[in-house]
Amino acid sequence: MATIFSKIVAGEIPAHKIAENDDFLAFLDIMPLKEGHTLVIPKKETDYIFDIEDQSLADMMVFAKQVSKKVKAAFPCERIGVSVIGLEVPHAHIHLIPIDTMDDMNFSKPKLEISSERLAEIAEKIRTA
């Protein structure tokens, strides 16, 4: 059964895309910890990030690095926090989150409720950064 992320890759579910190539996709988290919270996924559905082949995993991190530079330019912060939890959706993904404190990466905090219109603005801001 296809994951929600595979459905996004297939175009069956809309997403606020940030960047894309043949192998990877970056899009905004619709339940973010902070504005600019972006997810990076492999287009090939793989549940556990460490099941991804070595070269593909390395390429995914390079792709995430490129996306992180755009996020940081659009949302100035101390750093872009990186997290791989892998329990929420059975499709490997990397969280990129603008952070100024450790608490900014606290996944037990309530998520932001952001309108689709605002998410579209955020995505455009990151894409053009």
Image: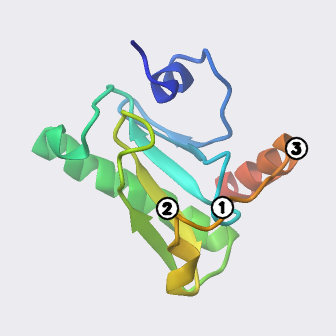
The secondary element bearing badge 3 is classed as helix
62 vs 108, nearest the viewer? 108
38 vs 58, nearest the viewer? 38
**Which residue position holds label 3?**
117
The residue sitting at 66% across, 61% down in the picture is 36
Q: Is 117 on the left or on the right of 11, as rendered?
A: right
**For the residue carrying disc 2, how many other residues have a C-alpha within 10 Å: few (<14), some (14-19), or many (20+)?**
many
**Does the residue at mark 1 contact the one at mark 3 (Cβ under 8 Å)?**
no
Which circle's residue, 1 or 2, is located before the other in the chain?
1
The secondary element bearing badge 2 is classed as strand
**Which label was assigned to residue 96?**
2
Quarter holding residue 30? top right
Structural distance between the alpha carbons of marks 1 and 3: 14 Å
The residue sitting at 50% across, 57% down in the picture is 67
**Which residue position holds label 1?**
36
Kindly identify the amino acid type of the residue bearing the numbered disc 1. Answer: Gly
Q: Is residue 118 above or below residue 88?
A: below
Which circle's residue, 1 or 3, is located before the other in the chain?
1
**For the residue carrying disc 3, how many other residues have a C-alpha within 10 Å: few (<14), some (14-19), or many (20+)?**
few
Kindly identify the amino acid type of the residue bearing the numbered disc 3. Answer: Glu
Q: Is residue 21 above or below residue 97?
A: above
Q: Is residue 3 above or below residue 41?
A: above
The residue sitting at 41% across, 56% down in the picture is 64
Which circle's residue, 3 or 2, is located before the other in the chain?
2
Kindly identify the amino acid type of the residue bearing the numbered disc 2. Answer: Leu
Quarter holding residue 100? bottom right
- Residue 4 x/y as whole percent: 52, 26
The residue sitting at 71% across, 50% down in the picture is 123
75 vs 114, nearest the viewer? 114
- Residue 23 x/y as whole percent: 35, 32
Structural distance between the alpha carbons of marks 1 and 2: 8 Å
